[in-house]
Image (cartoon, helix red, strand yellow):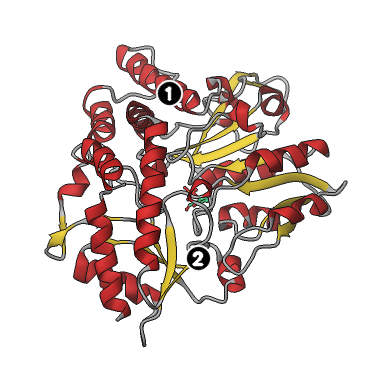
Amino acid sequence: MKETIDGHARSVRSQIPLLTRELCGRPLVFLDNASTTPKPRSVIDAVVNYYERSTANVHRGVHSLGEEATRLFDDARREVAALIGASPGEVVLVRGTTEAINFVANGLELGPEDEVVFPASEHHANWIPWRVHGKPVPVPIDEDGVPRWETIEKLITSKTKLVSIGHVSNVTGAIAPVEEVVRIAKARGVPVLLDAAQSLSHLPLDVAKLGVDFLAASSHKAFGPSGVGILWSRKEFLAKCPLYQVGGGMISLNNDIDVGGFVPRDAPFKFEAGTPAIEATIGFGAAVKWMRAIGMDAIRQHDLAMSKYLFEGLSDIPGVRILAKKLPYEQRIALATFVVDAPAMTQESVARALCDMFGVCVSAGFHCTHVLHARAHLPGTVRASPHVYNTTEEIDVLLEGVREIAS
Ligand code: PLP
């Protein structure tokens, strides 16, 4: 197990500059990848190269720099589309997962009685839009925050306009049974949205195989820059989806004779009004290239071995409650959310101590899932989320820290 984890990790960690720094006099142990990932050198270089050599607007400039910037930008969209088995024309560039889900919420033009079915454990990005658009119908979850998927069939009615699920929970790391959910929803003619914020960098993805209708994801959780993400959908939806913002760059024709008459460009450009996040998108393309060079299957193998190492290690520590501990490794990614029973310490102060005393970065609090924490009767949790570059030695540092704090 150690060999699988460390073999993968060693071959990639030297490519990530952040990992060479120290924190509080100790080597940095970054275990907060579910929040955001550190950036490989090739991503940083792609962004800097755009600034230093190709700064220009895209799809506008007739000069060489404009052409260069446009080529880099368009290549990035192609790269991201290929990662999920999609065609570039079906990939709308947005600010991130949050904007992508809001895009769909707006695009479906839901009325107050139109129901959206989603697990109660979802991140607020896949909860709050359904409070604002349509009517939320949460799928019940157990005391550990795992959806009771067997109940979903009954919740889908003639009023259901969408089923929206997180591919991987940002709290339990549980992988949703997407094929089964798609089968149930499709039998009722209901489209499915997949929030791939946590899965894009962990699991091989293919939109055709998954059978979903929408996929939302963020670059910054997949080794790319923040400020860009994707909404994937089929051409048919994009052709009829209403515009939610308008302006420059998305117009094919505007004349001053016919008031209100303008012709938008085809999708995806008609949804991308204004100057896009050019350098972030170019960096996103580089990040996808970087992940594909490692191989999504290799990343998954590291993940499986890492899950086992992390969960076995944490389970051995008295006074630690791990959420969804019993889920089989095949049904989760390497992400552990837990509570350390340490007198007079909040989970936030546990995380702070891990940083100050051991150089370990983890998340603490509610992780944008208030409902999940309420159902689990927890005022906060600690989340350790390793990725392909983390070693067993780093997990040992986390375990040493948790053991010391818990005792
Ligand atoms: N969905 C899930 C499962 C997430 O974990 C997150 C971020 O943590 C989001 C959505 C929102 O992503 P972003 O903040 O990049 O829009």
Where is residue 123, by image quadrant? bottom right
- Where 184 sits versus 55, above or below? below
Residue placed under numbered mark 1 in the picture: 79
Earlier residue among tags 1 and 2: 1
Total labels: the figure holds: 2
Gap between marks 1 and 2, in whole Å?
Answer: 35 Å
Q: Residues within 10 Å of mark 2 (few under 14, many from 20)?
A: many
From the viewer's perspective, is 251 left or right of 5? Answer: right
Residue 351 in view in this figure: yes
Residue placed under numbered mark 2 in the picture: 323
Residue at image coords 66%, 26%: 234
Mark 2 residue type: Leu
Where is residue 265, by image quadrant? top right
From the viewer's perspective, is 293 left or right of 200? Answer: left
Q: Residues within 10 Å of mark 1 (few under 14, many from 20)?
A: many
**Does dot 2 land on a helix, a strand or a loop?**
loop
Residue 275's x, y, as percent?
45, 31
Residue 388's x, y, as percent?
33, 42
Residue at image coords 65%, 53%: 129
- Where 242 sits versus 176, above or below? above
Residue at image coords 63%, 56%: 127
Residue at image coords 41%, 24%: 76
Residue furthest to the left in view is 25
Mark 1 residue type: Glu
From the viewer's perspective, is 50 left or right of 261? Answer: left
**Front residue of 15 and 391:** 391
From the viewer's perspective, is 166 left or right of 288? Answer: right
Residue 133 in view in this figure: no
Query: Tags 1 and 2 in contact by the CB under 8 Å rule?
Result: no
**Front residue of 324 and 59:** 324
Residue 377's x, y, as percent?
57, 76
